[in-house]
Amino acid sequence: MSATTAPTTTVNVDGTPFAYRELGTGAGVPLVLLHHVTAVLDDWDPALIDSLAAERRVILVDLRGVGRSGGVTPDTFEAMATDTVAFLDALGLDTVDLLGYSLGGIVAQVVARQAPDRVRRIVLAATTPAGGEGPAVTGTLLQEAFQKASEQGKHPKHFLFFEPSSAGQDAANAFLARLDQRTPEDRDTPISDEAVGAQLTALAAWGQSTTDAGLAEITQPVLVVNGDHDAMWPTPGTLDLARQLPNAKLAIYPDSGHGGIFQYHDIFARQVLDFLNN
């Protein structure tokens, strides 16, 4: 089984169906992935997922109101984190490793505070601490990217996730081609405008927060990763996040942005696996 063929299934989470996909060896602590704003299951890079699943049990999930999952998307990260823990309960997972990308990285931070005994290790990619630059203006950045994409006949992720350099745009094309590999018959449901609106509300509050969001309480080992020029949530926020976490390792990828983990998917996967297996 691969990321492009893993079936989409649902589990009852306190009366609401949550859509998820699972693949991998089943050995060791499961790795649960939390994705970015506007994303559904199909937005995870198959090459990255397959590399991780070669050594780990990997679980991808649509949280409440996203993709095929039922219910209404909450507009706070505290509620999203509560839903994440309830999803773990529904699958019978006592302890997991978390990989949170972008918005998912914020959810992972809050889960680690809410339920520290449920999380062994954490990977935070292209994300930021509370009060960091970027989240509060994500809605504007999305609108600008969609306008550019329409004008230039490209995908918004060409502008949001990748550098305008030839290497960056080549990486964008390769990434988007990989996303198209899944057969149309079992693709996820695109995210609704209502769900995106709730996510943007949560991001606005996160970006305007003046607290440290309890990062000192997150004592688990954390791998913090980003590109060196994140045009969505500027890379200095990633550096600040790594500084505030008591037990963090940092990796920054050259000539890359918010989608650096996809541009360098092979290197990132190896770093994640080494970090989790250490």
Image (cartoon, rainbow, N blue to C red):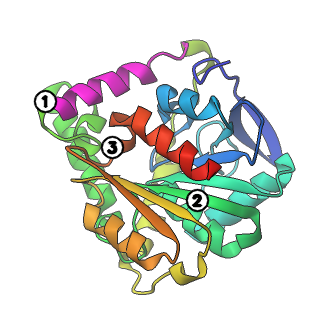
**Contact (CB < 8 A) between labels 2 and 1?**
no
Q: Residue at x 36, y 27 (%)?
A: 175
Instruction: Please report whichever mark, 3 or 2, sits nearer to the chain's N-terminal start.
Output: 2
The tag on residue 260 is: 3
Q: Hey, what amino acid is under mark 2? A: Ile
Q: Is residue 65 visible?
A: no
Q: Amino acid at mark 3?
A: Gly
Earlier sequence position, callout 1 versus callout 3: 1
**Residue 151 in sight in this render:** yes
Question: How many angstroms separate mark 1 from mark 3 (CA)?
Answer: 14 Å
Q: Residues within 10 Å of mark 3 (few under 14, many from 20)?
A: many
Foreground residue among 39 and 237: 237
**Callout 2 secondary element:** strand
Q: Which numbered disc flags the more N-terminal residue, 2 or 1?
A: 2
Circle 2 or circle 1, nearest the eye: 2
Q: Residue at x 83, y 45 (%)?
A: 12
Check disc 3 and report its element: helix, strand or loop: helix
Considering the whole magenta stretch, tell me its main secondary structure: helix
The image shows residue 84 at horizontal and vertical percentages of 69, 57
Which quadrant of the view contains residue 132? bottom left
Q: Does residue 240 appear to the left or right of 67 in the view shown?
A: left
Judging by the rendered image, the residue that carries numbered circle 1 is 166
Mark 2: give few (<14), some (14-19) or many (20+) Cα within 10 Å: many
State the image coordinates of residue 243 (x, y, percent, origin top left). Answer: 39, 76
Name of the residue lying farthest toward the bottom:
211
SS class, disc 1: helix
Q: Is residue 29 magenta?
A: no
Q: What is the span of residues highlighted in magenta in the rendered image? A: 167-183
Q: Residue at x 43, y 73 (%)?
A: 206
Residues under labels 2 and 1: Cα distance?
32 Å
